[in-house]
Amino acid sequence: TRLSNLLGVDSGEGDLFCHKVSVEAEAEAEFIPLTNFREGKTGKVRLILEKSELTKTLEKAGLSPGRTIMIKKANAKSYDVETENGSLSLDSDLASKIIVQN
């Protein structure tokens, strides 16, 4: 082939640029509201779209950016979350304001 000739490769195999590369395909991280997580799912809190006394309460409970949490129970009205500090229950309105990385 012309490219092989240009590069000075005279093996007629033509596989100069066709090496198999094995890369562990890791799912791309997504940033989604806690309300999109299902039971048993673990993720890292990235952002809480709420600024109030409530955020201080959440932080004391272990739910703050950078912390890992797990959804214990989820339905349309409430989300039971386990943090390093214990468990807490969130309503769907508050859960939708918590952005988690899967």
Image (cartoon, grey):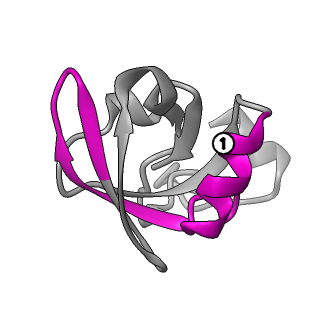
Quickly name the residue at label 1: 54
Res 56 seen here: yes
Quarter of the image where one finds residue 8: bottom right
- At x 66%, y 42%, the residue is 54
Q: Is residue 23 visible?
A: no
Q: Is residue 69 above or below residue 76?
A: below
Side of 33 relative to 31 (left or right): left
Q: Which stretch is magenta?
A: 52-80
| Magenta-colored stretch includes residue 98 | no
Front-lying residue, 33 or 3: 33
Q: Position of residue 97 (x, y in %)?
A: 58, 27
The residue nearer to you, when weighing 13 against 100, is 100
- List x then y, in percent, for residue 32: 50, 31
Q: With respect to residue 67, does 84 lie above or below?
A: below
Q: Type of residue at label 1?
A: Leu
Residue at horizontal 57%, vertical 59%? 63
In the picture, measured across the screen, residue 48 lies left or right of residue 73, that is right
Q: Determine whether the residue tagged by mark 1 lies in a helix, strand or loop.
A: helix
Pinpoint residue 59: horizontal percent, then vertical percent.
Answer: 67, 61
Residue sitting at x 42%, y 49% = 27
How many numbered marks does the figure carry? 1
Task: Decide which of 78, 96 is in the foreground and name it.
Answer: 78
Q: Quadrant of the N terminus?
A: top right
Image position of 21 (left or right of 47) = left
Q: Residue furthest front?
A: 53
Rendering quarter of residue 50 = top right
Instruction: Residue 55: say if magenta.
Output: yes
Dot 1 alpha-carbon crowd within 10 angstroms: few under 14, some 14 to 19, many 20 or more: few
Which residue is rendered at x = 83% and y = 44% of the image? 6
